[in-house]
Image (cartoon, rainbow, N blue to C red):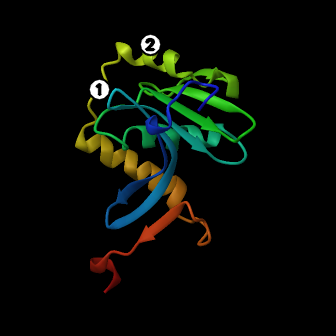
């Protein structure tokens, strides 16, 4: 926070994101949401190991945390980081030092259109996260909470 110039109130840790795939539901954690001027401008997702394997699900999450496309996505394992463009999922920078500082993020998002995510798109993105992160997840993983569905549990 201090090094990049963010205020504590601009960062939301461990945000609960509801994921749905048909009758299946789960809640996953988004490590950090960064909000500037009442808009989520960046999400940060942590996971050990390979960054590339988390690109697609992080992009999907950036389309579900708000009704618009979050413009900047950071995927990190604590040692390295990839910064993705929310519009297309392409890596625009790499390295922990490349995580945008507050003023840089404000500049990057000043002219961003924050495109609306359609309901159909949100459903597709939710399915992607469910398939990659929830199906087959370890029961002891405290970042995922599978929710029971009373219609399918009977």
Q: Visible in this render: residue 95?
A: no
Q: Please, what secondary structure does the residue beneath circle 2 have? A: helix
Q: For mark 1, what is the residue?
A: 115
Please provide percent x and percent y for residue 30: 50, 48
Horizontal relation, residue 71 to residue 32: left or right = left
Based on the displayed image, in which of its 4 quarters is residue 25 positioned?
A: bottom left
In this orientation, which residue lies closer to the viewer: 35 or 62? 35
Residue underneath mark 2: 107
Q: Is residue 151 above or below residue 85?
A: below
Determine the residue positioned at 43% across, 60% down. 27
Q: Residue at x 37, y 14 (%)?
A: 110
- Of the two numbered discs 1 and 2 in the rendering, the one whose residue sits closer to the viewer: 2
Position in image of residue 46 (x %, y %): 62, 45
Report which quarter residue 44 is drawn in: top right
Quadrant (top left, top right, bottom left, bottom right) of the N terminus: top right
Is residue 154 something that shows in the picture? Answer: yes
Q: Earlier in the sequence, mark 1 or mark 2?
A: 2
Q: Are marks 1 and 2 in contact (CB under 8 Å)?
A: no
Label 1 – label 2 distance at C-alpha: 17 Å
Which residue appears at 33% of the width and 75% of the height? 149
Most extreme residue toward the right is 79
For residue 126, above or below residue 11: below
**Is disc 2 surrounded by few (<14), some (14 to 19) or many (20+) residues within 10 Å?**
few
Where does the image place residue 22, in percent across and percent down from the top left?
Answer: 32, 62
Instruction: Residue 105: give x, y in percent of width and height.
Output: 48, 20
- Left or right: residue 41 versus residue 2 is left
Q: SS of the residue at dot 1? A: loop
Q: Is residue 73 left or right of residue 66?
A: right
Query: Which label belongs to residue 139?
Result: none
């Amino acid at each position: 926070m201090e090094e990049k110039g963010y205020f504590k109130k601009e960062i939301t840790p461990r945000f609960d994101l509801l994921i749905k795939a048909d009758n299946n539901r789960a809640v996953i954690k988004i490590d950090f949401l960064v909000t500037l001027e009442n808009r989520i401008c960046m999400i940060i997702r942590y996971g050990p190991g390979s960054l590339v394997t988390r690109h697609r699900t992080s992009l999907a999450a950036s389309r579900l945390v708000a009704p618009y496309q979050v413009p900047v996505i950071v995927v990190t394992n604590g040692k390295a980081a990839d910064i993705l463009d929310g519009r297309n999922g392409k890596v625009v920078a790499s390295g922990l030092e490349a995580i945008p500082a507050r003023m840089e993020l404000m500049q990057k998002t000043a002219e961003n259109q924050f495109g609306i995510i359609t309901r159909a798109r949100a459903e597709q993105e939710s399915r992607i996260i469910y398939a990659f992160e929830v199906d087959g997840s370890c029961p002891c993983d405290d970042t995922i909470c599978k929710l029971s569905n009373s219609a399918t549990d009977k």
